Image (tube, rainbow, N blue to C red):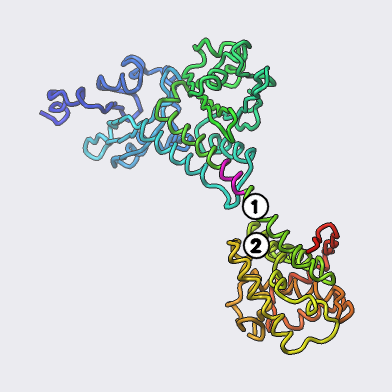
Amino acid sequence: MTLADALTASGFLEATATAFMLRDASGHVLDINDRAERVFGCSREDLMSDDPTRLTWDPVHQDGSPFSRDDLPFAVALDTQDPVYGEVQGLLTPTGERRWYTVNAYPVLQGDQCTGVLLAYLDAGERVRRTQLVDLLLAVTERPAHPTGEAETFAHVCHTLVDAGPFALAWVGVADEGPERRVDIVEAAGVTGFITPNMVSWSSAQPNGLGPSGIALRSGHPVVVNDMTLSPIVHQWRDQITRYDLRSAAVLPFRPAGRRAVLVVYDRHPNSFDELTVVGLERIVHEAERMIAHGESVRRLSTALEGTLAALSQVTEARDPYTAGHQVRVGALATALGTRLDLDADLVELIGQAGDVHDVGKIALASEILIKPGRLSDLEMRMVRRHSSVGHEILARASLPWPIPEVALQHHERLDGSGYPAGLTASAIGLPARIVAVADVIEAMSSHRPYRPVVGREEALGFVEANAGTLFDSDVVAVARTVLMEGFVFPEPSTSSIVSI
């Protein structure tokens, strides 16, 4: 008795959950087990037919790319005479449904000749769907460090589902609470030609409100249509569905910022939205809700931070009319320098904000010292130099984000250790402080002071360039000339920004 005879006699081939298919070297199917009919969803007659048009397998990889003929497990096993293990393959059933299998291919050898291949197919649908959903969720959560707006979040979700996922179309609709109960489709990706004006509503009194989206918006529950060629609730969109070759859809209601909305996802194959897939898509829309809520919270905090910084800047400069606008101008130049250095946009914004309040410690100085026209005494100079430490203490106690307090502390430090308050050298001085230091000197020398006339922009540039690498960061100084020569203009001081105290 051969091994094949033993397996047949034991009933193993029919009892197993694996579909077996024996093909000869030409690819013709010689035999299958009964399980193959259930696994592939088609009859023995279809599976063993010599008519190549009877079945359209359309084999694809997990990423949706097609298998070439030479890459198929059958062809590889036949060519190499070595088994192929664990190849994941998506095949089309006769109904148009995409099913996923793990395929093993065993060459059948007679002497040194390969006369056929035994193929073993095991259902891998759940594993593939789980992998796809996890990958999609990770792709959705991979957002920039700074918060994005609602429209950007919706667009990101839609494009991720289409570009990184298996879906043909995804759109987000937001419900209008007015009497017409309109649904505004605000973002979409994929075959967007499917979308038409006033395509859906959520009014039960309107025909376009009786479809899946309207039902989901009214009920607050997901709605799935796994074969749109048969379902009566999509009959009024049947022509559109046929034209764009869409077979199944899932509608996921969610509440961004408390409003009613739906994410609608379409696939080109029937039965694409099982319970596992719907649960995965629900997690994605909940993540979108969280991202929008987080972005709104950060924007509110950012607005509060901007107000706090503006108030601190105004309080500082109101005590010294000769330097009114100095901090804002330093912040503007520091922002331009950070941008030219190609720093991250979030860091550039923080550097500009740090520049806006770098001298806040001067509120502890007597006005007589701030506006004194002559040379300061040693005692007065020591008092002035304390403003860096005082500013750091004020900003740190206010729990302002890095690097704002550190810039207030370090913007008078110099690379050779000759600065204050700590005599830091080189890399011990943070880059944001090195940027603000250059912006501070250039702005101060370009503006009038009670103890000297305007020096001028070119002379200010000459001073920092002469001391590049000694007092100031060489890279920052280099971009300073570029920025100023390209036409940078300091913002004009605004009298409305000065408060009286």
Pick the front one: 312 or 353: 312
The three-letter amino acid code for the residue at tag 1 is Ser
Could you tell me which quadrant the C terminus lies in? Answer: bottom right
- Could you say whether the residue bearing mark 1 is in a helix, strand or loop? helix
Q: Give the residue at the far left of this rendering.
A: 1
Pick the front one: 355 or 340: 355
| Residue 18 is covered by the magenta coloring | no
Counting other residues with Cα less than 10 Å from the Cα at mark 2, is it few (<14), some (14-19), or many (20 or more)? few
Locate residue 323, reporting x and y percent: 82, 71
Locate residue 294, reporting x and y percent: 56, 45
Mark linked to residue 343: 2
Pick the front one: 153 or 340: 153
Query: Relative to 143, does residue 362 appear above or below in the rendering?
Result: below
Q: Which residues are magenta?
A: 293-298
| Residue 295 is covered by the magenta coloring | yes
- Residue marked by disc 1: 302
